[in-house]
Image (spheres, grey):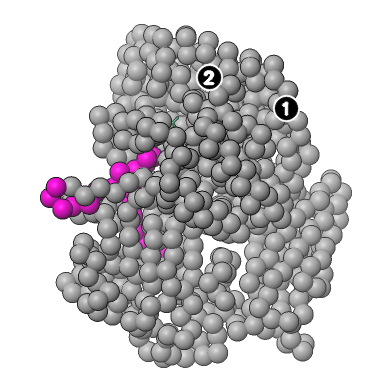
C-alpha cells in the first residue's frame, strides 16, 4: 500500500503530485474534544495558518506560542475525475510530533515521529470531481519514550508545558509540505542503488520493488539527457564507460528512469537523480571514490525566524552559499532528518551529509539547565517503548534517504548516555537491527559527548567512525582556564592515539556562544574575539592528530531554544547569526578552510 511508500512525489505521464501548501484552517484543542465534536469535517472560528510552518512564532500571546497538546489543521481540496482508477494519497513531509489523519470525516491513519514523511492512502475515502476535506489532529507533547526525548508537565493553571531534554525549541505543526498524490494501481514502490566506480568505468547495481508483476525497464541518462546505459529486470547492473563521478564539491548527477511495462504498454514510471560514487572507511580515513576526504562543515538546525522549524528553500539556498563561501564540504543534519529537498540540494552542490535521527536527549541533558534527567537514561522503565519508536525512525530515515549521493553516514543517536552498562544492550540491538537497512552499507555512528570519553564510554565498539562533541572552553575550563581545556583535550586524544582503535574521529560539536558585535581586547566569553580563540585552540589540537578527519563546529547559525538563564533568545554558538550574517569567526574559518587541500 502507499502507506509504506517513501519515494519523493513526482509528476509525469502516470503520476500526479499537487502541493496542498498555503493557508489551512487551524485551531487548538486543549480539551482534546475535537474528534467527538465533528472537527474532522470543520473547525469553528479557525485561524488561517501557513503550511509549511511551525505555528509558534506567528502568535503574539505566550499561551499560544508555548501551546502543548492537541491542535488541528483542516483544508478543502479538489479531486479531479482523472484520478479515477489511481491510488490517491496525501503525503505529509512531517507532522510534529504525531498526527491522526481524517478525510471527509473518516479516520485514515496515525503516525508517530515529527521529522519523517508518511502517506495517508485516501483512495477509498475521496469523492471524484468534487471538493473533499482533510483534517489533521497533531500532538506536540514530549515524552521519555518518544523521539526527541523530554517531558510534558501540567502547570498549576492547567496549561501543559513541554520540557525538552534537548537544546532546540519544540517548534510544532505541519513543518514540511503536504502533497496530494495519485499513482497507478500497478506502481513502483521503491528502488535502491549501490555502486562500484573506477576512473574508466562505473557499475550501478539497482533493485526495484513494485506492487505489480509487470516487466521492469531501467535507463540511465547523463546531464545532457543522453542515455548511457539500459537494463531490464527488477534487479540488474547499469555499466557506464568513462563515467563522470559524483565528487565532493564537484557534483555530477545522472537520471535513473524506471518503467513498469505490461504487455508492451508502460503502466508506471519513476525517475530520480543519482550520483555515481562510493563511500568507505579505511583505517582512520574517510574515502569518497577511494580518495581521502577531510570533513569541514557544521552542525545545523532547520530553524529560521517566522517559520520556526519549517523547511524553507530560501534559507537552504543561503546556507549552502554560506557553506561554499566559507569552504565547507559537509554538515550533520543535527538533530533530526531534514526535509528531502535539503538532501536533493546537497546532491546537486556536492555536500556530504551525516543523516541523524531525532534520538536526542537520551541522557541527563548535558547542561542540566535544560532540566533533564539526573540518572542514566537507559535504566528508565520507558526504554522498551522508546526503542520501538527509535528503530522505526531509523528504518524510515534510511529508507527515505538511501539514494542520495550526499548521504555519507547515519547518526543513530545524539549523545546517548553510553557510560552506563545499561546502554550496551540497547546499542547492541540498535546496531544489529540497523545493519542491513542501507543497501550501500554506509558507516553508522552516533555522537559521544564529554561524559563519553575513551576511558568512560562502554559503546566504542559500535560506531564505524567517531563523532565527538567536546566543550572545553565553554561548558568547562572556560575563559582564562581554556589552556587547561586544551590540555585535557590533548590528554584524551593521546589516549585514543595510544589505543588500538583505528577509526576516524570527526569533531561534530565544539563552540562558544557569541553575541554579534560584542568586542573585547583581551577577549572575554560571549565576545567575537573569544569565539575565534576557542576555534584556534581546537584547530591547534586537530592539526596534531592525523586520525582526526573532520571539524564541524557548533553551529552554522544561531537558533531558537527553550528560554533559560543560559540562553539569550536562543543558542548563540552560530558562526553566522540567525539571519545568516557572518560573525568574525566566519572570516577566520574561511581563511583556514580555503587554505586546507581537499584531501588534507
Ligand atoms: C555536549 C552537549 C551537546 N550539545 C547538543 C546541542 O544540541 C546543543 O545545542 C549544544 C549547546 O549546548 O550549545 C550542546
Q: Position of residue 405 (x, y in %)?
A: 66, 51
Q: Residue 553 appears at what percent x and percent y? A: 50, 30
Above or below, 191 against 300 in this view is: below
Can residue 344 be seen?
no
Write down the residue under mark 2. Answer: 538
Dot 2 or dot 1, earlier in sequence: 1
Residue 3 spot, x, y in % from top left: 53, 72
Q: Residues within 10 Å of mark 2 (few under 14, many from 20)?
A: many
Note whether 230 is above or below 372 in the view shown.
Answer: below
Quadrant of image for the C terminus: top right
Q: Is residue 81 magenta?
A: no
- As helix, strand or loop, the secondary structure at mark 2 comes to helix
Name the quadrant containing residue 178: bottom left
- The answer to whether the residue bearing label 2 lies less than 8 angstroms from the nearest atom of ligand 1 is no
Does the magenta stretch mainly form a helix, a strand or a loop? loop
* 365 displayed left or right of 46: right
- Dot 2 and dot 1 residues touching (CB under 8 Å): no
Q: Which residue is found at the position 38% from the left and 65% from the top? A: 99
- Residue at the spot x=50%, y=37% of the render? 416
Q: Is ligand 1 closer than 8 angstroms to the Cβ of mark 1?
A: no
Residue 167 included in the magenta stretch of the image? yes
Depth check: 387 or 204 in front? 387
The secondary structure type at the circle numbered 1 is loop
- The residue that label 1 is drawn on is 502
Pick the quarter of the image with the N terminus.
bottom right
- Residues 101 and 11: in front is 101
- The residue closer to the viewer here, 308 or 143, is 143
| Horizontal side, residue 290 vs residue 306: left or right | right
Amino acid at each position: 500500500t502507499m502507506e509504506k511508500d517513501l519515494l519523493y512525489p513526482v509528476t509525469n505521464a502516470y503520476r500526479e503530485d499537487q502541493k496542498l501548501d498555503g493557508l489551512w484552517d487551524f485551531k487548538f484543542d486543549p480539551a482534546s474534544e475535537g474528534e467527538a465534536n465533528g472537527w474532522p469535517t470543520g473547525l469553528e472560528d479557525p485561524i488561517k495558518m501557513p503550511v509549511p510552518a511551525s505555528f509558534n512564532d506567528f502568535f503574539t500571546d505566550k499561551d499560544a506560542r508555548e501551546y502543548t497538546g492537541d491542535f488541528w489543521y483542516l483544508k478543502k481540496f479538489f479531486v479531479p475525475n482523472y484520478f479515477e482508477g489511481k491510488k490517491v494519497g496525501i503525503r505529509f513531509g512531517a507532522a510534529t510530533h504525531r498526527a491522526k489523519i481524517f478525510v471527509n470525516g473518516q479516520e485514515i491513519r496515525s503516525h508517530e515521529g515529527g521529522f519523517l514523511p508518511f502517506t495517508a492512502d485516501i483512495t477509498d475515502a475521496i469523492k471524484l470531481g468534487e471538493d473533499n476535506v482533510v483534517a489533521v489532529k497533531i500532538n506536540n507533547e514530549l515524552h521519555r519514550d518518544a523521539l526527541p526525548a523530554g517531558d510534558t508537565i501540567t502547570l498549576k493553571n492547567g496549561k501543559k508545558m513541554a520540557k525538552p531534554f534537548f537544546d532546540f525549541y519544540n517548534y510544532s505543526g505541519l513543518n514540511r509540505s503536504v502533497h496530494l498524490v495519485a499513482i497507478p494501481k500497478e506502481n513502483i514502490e521503491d528502488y535502491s542503488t549501490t555502486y562500484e566506480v573506477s576512473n574508466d568505468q562505473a557499475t550501478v547495481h539497482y533493485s526495484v520493488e513494485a506492487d505489480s508483476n509487470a516487466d521492469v525497464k531501467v535507463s540511465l541518462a547523463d546531464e545532457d539527457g543522453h542515455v548511457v546505459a539500459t537494463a531490464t529486470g527488477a534487479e540488474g547492473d547499469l555499466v557506464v564507460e568513462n563515467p563522470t563521478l559524483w565528487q565532493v564539491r564537484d557534483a555530477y548527477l545522472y537520471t535513473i528512469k524506471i518503467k513498469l511495462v505490461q504487455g508492451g504498454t508502460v503502466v508506471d514510471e519513476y525517475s530520480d537523480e543519482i550520483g555515481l560514487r562510493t563511500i568507505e572507511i579505511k583505517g582512520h580515513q574517510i574515502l569518497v571514490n577511494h580518495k581521502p576526504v577531510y570533513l569541514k562543515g557544521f552542525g545545523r538546525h532547520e530553524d529560521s525566524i517566522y517559520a520556526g522549524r519549517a523547511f524553507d528553500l530560501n534559507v537552504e539556498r543561503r546556507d549552502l552559499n554560506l557553506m561554499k563561501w566559507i569552504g565547507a564540504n559537509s554538515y550533520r543534519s543535527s538533530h533530526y532528518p531534514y526535509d528531502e529537498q535539503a538532501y536533493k540540494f546537497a546532491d546537486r552542490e556536492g555536500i556530504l551529509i551525516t543523516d541523524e535521527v531525532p534520538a536526542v536527549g537520551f541522557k541527563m541533558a548535558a547542561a542540566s539547565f535544560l532540566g533533564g534527567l539526573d540518572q542514566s537514561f537507559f535504566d528508565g522503565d520507558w526504554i522498551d517503548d522508546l526503542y520501538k519508536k527509535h528503530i522505526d525512525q531509523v528504518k524510515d530515515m534510511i529508507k527515505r534517504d538511501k539514494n542520495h549521493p550526499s548521504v555519507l553516514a547515519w547518526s543513530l543517536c545524539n549523545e546517548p548516555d553510553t557510560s552506563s552498562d545499561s546502554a550496551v544492550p540497547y546499542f547492541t540491538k540498535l546496531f544489529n537491527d540497523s545493519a542491513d537497512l542501507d543497501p550501500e552499507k554506509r558507516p553508522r555512528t552516533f555522537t559521544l559527548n564529554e561524559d563519553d570519553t575513551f576511558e568512560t564510554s562502554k559503546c566504542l565498539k559500535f560506531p564505524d567512525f567517531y563523532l565527538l562533541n567536546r566543550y572545553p572552553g565553554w561548558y568547562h575550563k572556560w575563559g582564562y582556564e581554556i589552556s587547561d581545556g586544551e590540555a585535557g583535550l590533548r590528554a584524551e586524544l593521546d589516549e585514543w592515539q595510544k589505543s588500538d582503535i583505528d577509526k576516524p574521529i570527526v569533531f561534530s560539536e565544539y563552540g562558544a556562544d557569541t553575541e554579534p558585535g560584542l568586542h573585547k581586547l583581551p577577549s572575554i566569553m560571549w565576545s567575537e574575539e573569544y569565539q575565534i580563540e576557542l576555534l584556534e585552540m581546537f584547530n591547534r589540537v586537530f592539526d596534531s592528530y592525523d586520525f582526526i578527519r573532520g571539524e564541524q563546529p557548533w553551529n552554522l547559525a544561531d537558533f531558537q531554544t527553550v528560554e533559560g538563564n543560559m540562553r539569550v533568545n536562543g543558542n548563540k554558538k552560530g558562526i553566522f547569526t540567525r539571519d545568516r550574517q557572518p560573525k568574525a569567526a566566519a572570516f577566520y574559518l574561511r581563511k583556514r578552510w580555503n587554505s586546507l587541500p581537499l584531501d588534507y
